[in-house]
Image (tube, helix red, strand yellow):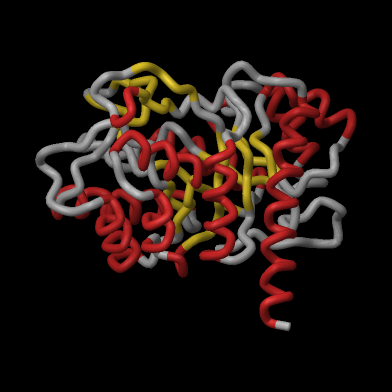
Amino acid sequence: MAITSDARPHTAERTGIGLRLPHIAEVVATRPLVGWLEIHPENFLANPHGLELLTDLARDYPISVHTVGISIGSADGIDREHLRRVRGLVDRLHPVLVSGHLAWSTVGGAYLNDLLPLPYTVETLRVVVAQLTEVQEGLGRAYVIENPSSYVSLATSTMTELEFLHALVHETGCRLLCDVSNVHLSGHNMGYDPYRYIDEFPAAAVAELHLGGFTPEDDDATPGGTLLVDTHAHAVAAPAWELYAHAIHRFGQQPTMVEWDNDLPALAVLLGEAAKADRVQERITEERHAHLG
């Protein structure tokens, strides 16, 4: 399910931004030239004023809904009440994409403020396949799965993350959100080649790309003594931009979104990051045309 453009000036040919509540009034007032807006539904479900502003923006911009509370990998099952509430928001906004993380964040009815890793096993695959099916039926539409940011590997895993993603696509026909910054971060933390990861990612399943900033922390157990933490609190780092260019070569032009969730800058700074992604896509497209010509 790809993002589609229409007659409006804001199209998926341009990079989107993550719309966070501190920026929403300025976006409503200025209508910046940006491709699309991605929101976390959890920020709007209990915020009537924010939802009213978002509904107004949805008339002018394609909207993507990126969930953080579905917990597709939870052994306790999906929170059906939360899924019902997200469905209500989806029905109101008619987003171009709905997505979430390959992770778990709930146990015993409690929500944890993190996206926690899964063991990549046949049993986990069965759980995720079943719950992905339930989520898609509950939403009445496709639910796109994002690769996680990784800090540890689980000894019980019997397949790699890429093998798990390929199996998930094979079993369900689902689409994937490739978070390029997560690939760079995880490659650094886990000691693998992020370029090879992109090369072996299920390219035909890609529906969207993400870029975001990370925070380095000292950690003696990590290769190089530095752990990269997916904080979304900084501009996109140079190595992630280079990997993004490689991803565009591999996947072709894709709807891209820049995330910035913590230590939010001025809106103009975030729009500048989106413009950088536009320039990368334009450069790769020109290089392809020159090569073909």
For the residue pair 68 and 182, the one nearer the viewer reads as: 182
**Residue 190 visible somewhere in the drawing:** yes
In the image, taking residue 43 as reference, residue 270 lies left or right, namely right
Task: Write down the quadrant of residue 25 in the picture.
Answer: top right
Q: Quadrant of the C terminus?
A: bottom right
Report the residue at 37% width, 24% height from top.
226
Above or below, 90 relative to 140: above
For the residue pair 276 and 206, the one nearer the viewer reads as: 276
Task: Write down the quadrant of residue 40 in the picture.
Answer: top right
Above or below, 219 relative to 62: above
For the residue pair 52 and 101, the one nearer the viewer reads as: 101
Task: Write down the quadrant of residue 189 in the picture.
Answer: top left
Q: Quadrant of the N terminus?
A: bottom right
In the image, taking residue 112 as reference, residue 261 lies left or right, namely right
For the residue pair 90 and 236, the one nearer the viewer reads as: 236
Q: Farthest residue in the front direction?
A: 224
- Residue 286: where, in percent of width, then height? 74, 67
Q: Farthest residue in the right direction?
A: 30
The number of discs equals 0
Report the residue at 34% width, 21% height from top.
112
- Residue 270: where, in percent of width, then height? 72, 31
- Residue 62: where, in percent of width, then height? 72, 50
